[in-house]
Image (cartoon, helix red, strand yellow):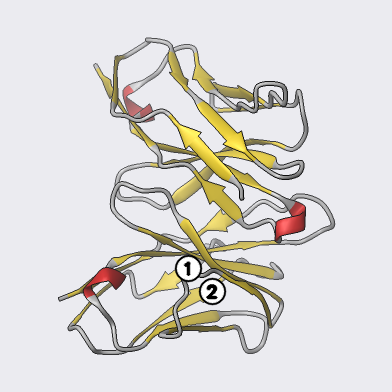
Amino acid sequence: DTGVSQDPRHKITKRGQNVTFRCDPISEHNRLYWYRQTLGQGPEFLTYFQNEAQLEKSRLLSNRFSAERPKGSFSTLEIQRTEQGDSAMYLCASSFRQGGTDTQYFGPGTRLTVL
Amino acid sequence: GNSVTQMEGPVTLSEEAFLTINCTYTATGYPSLFWYVQYPGEGLQLLLKATKADDKGSNKGFEATYRKETTSFHLEKGSVQVSDSAVYFCALSEKAAGNKLTFGGGTRVLVKP
């Protein structure tokens, strides 16, 4: 399977704990995006990378959130001191930036539940 | 800023009925437009896209036409099947904004046999 993969698929944690999610993009895709989707809503942009450079962060991404893509391949999203409001589906997407519109392909998501 | 508005659901139809989901957008530049579909228990899948005015995207019997004059990208299918039951998301992206996607709230479609 050469699609976008995310790990874990589900995470249950207690308030105040730190969590880390991983995303493996489609091979050779140079762009990687993170989105958050709450129940009954559309996904909202969090941040994106071109290769290893983080080019934009949404205001939704508080200082408790950090994302990395150290070698321009997989990416991690860490949430420190989780809050109940962080409960959501975290989606990763990748694309190949080629000068025009790039089409994003999504992974299955990581569902976070903060108790 | 950019925004996408789509009709609220749920939309309940009988098999073989005609489906329309309205989508309108606000953008500062010249966006590309997309429809994504989320089947129960699965991730988002690209259904179709259009990158410039008057383009028509089509896939699996679904169609949508990029209408710049009405800032719309309505999704249509002539004869739905039970397997089309899903949540449909309209979205836009702009090259000048890093091609990040701005999504509508989603429309749940339920097709009954």
The answer for which chain carries disc 1 is: A
Furthest-right residue in view?
Answer: A99
**Closest to the observer, B2 or B8:** B2
In this rendering, would B29 be left or right of B21? right
Front-lying residue, B61 or B22? B22
Residue displayed at 59% across by 52% down? B101
Residue B31, disc: none
Vertical side of B70 occupied by A6: above or below: below
Task: Check disc 2: other Cα within 10 Å, few if <14, some if 14-19, many if 20+.
Answer: many
Q: Quadrant location of residue B17?
A: top left
Q: Is residue B80 above or below residue B24?
A: above
Closer-to-camera residue (A33/A45): A45
Of callouts 1 and 2, the N-terminal one: 1
The residue sitting at 24% across, 16% down in the picture is B113
Residue at image position (55%, 80%) is A75
Amino acid carrying mark 1 in the image: Ser
Check whether the beta carbons of the residues at disc 1 and disc 2 lie within 8 A of each other.
yes
The residue pinned by badge 2 equals A24
Q: Chain of mark 2?
A: A
What is the x, y in percent for residue A36? 42, 63
Circle on res. A5 = 1
Mark 2 belongs to which amino acid?
A: Asp
Give coordinates of residue B110: x percent, y percent: 28, 26
Secondary structure state at the residue bearing disc 2: strand
Dot 1 falls on a residue whose secondary structure is strand
For the C terminus of chain A, the image quarter is bottom left
Within 10 Å of the Cα at label 1, are there few (<14), some (14-19), or many (20+) other Cα atoms? many
Q: Is residue A61 above or below residue B104?
A: below
Q: What's the distance in space between the residues labelled 1 and 2, CA to CA? A: 5 Å
* Percent x, y of residue A69: 60, 83
